[in-house]
Amino acid sequence: MSADTPLVRLTGVGKNYGNVIALRDVDLRVDAGRVTCVLGDNGAGKSTLIKIIAGLHRHDAGSYEVEGRQVAFDSPREALDRGIATVYQDLAVVPLMPVWRNFFLGSEKRRGFGRLDVEYMRRTTKAELARMGIDLRDVDQPVGTLSGGERQCVAIARAVHFGAKVLVLDEPTAALGVKQAGVVLRYIVQAREQGLGVVFITHNPHHAYPVGDRFLILNRGRSIGHHTKDQITRDQLISLMAGGAELEQLAHELETIAAGRTAARELTEETDTKPPPP
Ligand SMILES: Nc1ncnc2c1ncn2[C@@H]1O[C@H](COP(=O)(O)OP(=O)(O)OP(=O)(O)O)[C@@H](O)[C@H]1O
Ligand SMILES: [Mg+2]
């Protein structure tokens, strides 16, 4: 593998659900120490794309390579074994479980006789969170008491700890306020600085632009642009995202409706003020 072989490369990828074309001819590249943003409106195919990367769905056209080798995953476990960790928006956390327990869920550390090494797991969780700049008062507190942003951060720290090379985040900032979104964006940058390749799905260009190195914009399952940061300005990204042409069409339609209403009103007023026929 040469130094510039991407961690993940999709070429001409397509996916249908029955008659629905969810994705067609999409290319994507994820490099170590870089953030690839996937943007698009509702139904654009973003989740479908990450489900393919995560091993949840098979693509039915094109090719998917991990570190230069063709893959066709049958399960998320296989993708994880190749270092691809996915954090879903509706995180699969158990709200009543302590943070450390959740951190090690499915990968518990044991001592002799199969006993859980609770001390090790507590300590490690705290240290790993601190390394990402997250200072939790108490790793024994239930996950359910964390804010949405903190939960995303714990999930990111967990993926980093368990050796992910690629971190896939499906709309991690969508349900968050400005401040919390900022916190999550900071951890995306931290993960990038630690050399991970990050795939950041969002429909918010204001979140994508400051952290992204590459931008793939999807519209109804097709790519309408794949740019590196030096090829696109923030305003161009916003305009592409908003579907510049579609917005103009919408504005035009709204104006036509408004104009129609004004004309109708004038007509009614005219009829009202007309003297009755003799
Ligand atoms: N399991 C499925 N079966 C049938 N159609 C599906 C399925 N999953 C997605 N689709 C369709 O595929 C298209 C792309 O959906 P997808 O969920 O990938 O979009 P998205 O960009 O993630 O949207 P959102 O922003 O709303 O999450 C949509 O038209 C959707 O209705
Ligand atoms: Mg989605």
Image: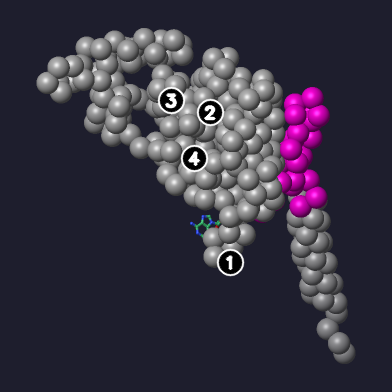
Q: Is residue 224 magenta?
A: yes
Q: Nearer the viewer, residue 66 or 86?
A: 66
Helix or strand or loop: what does disc 3 sit on? helix
127 sits left or right of 156 in the view:
left
| Cβ atoms at labels 3 and 4 below 8 Å apart | no
On the question of residue 251 being in view, the answer is: no
Q: Which mark is residue 19?
A: 1
Q: Secondary structure at mark 2?
A: strand
At mark 4, the secondary structure is helix
- Closer to the chain start, of discs 1 and 4, is 1
Query: Decide: marks 1, 4 in contact (CB < 8 A)?
Result: no
| Residue range (magenta) | 220-246
Residue 106, relative to residue 23: is it above or below? above
**Which residue in the protein does label 2 denote?**
166
What x and y, as percent, mark residue 29? 66, 34
Q: What residue sits right under mark 3 in the picture? A: 159
Q: Do the residues bearing badges 4 and 2 touch, measured as CB atoms within 8 Å? A: no
Q: Is mark 2 within 8 Å of ligand 2?
A: no
Whole-number angstrom distance, CA of label 1 to CA of label 2: 31 Å
Query: Which residue is more in the foreground, 84 or 97?
Result: 84
Sequence-first tag of 3 and 4: 4
Q: Residue furthest right?
A: 278
Quarter placement of the C terminus: bottom right
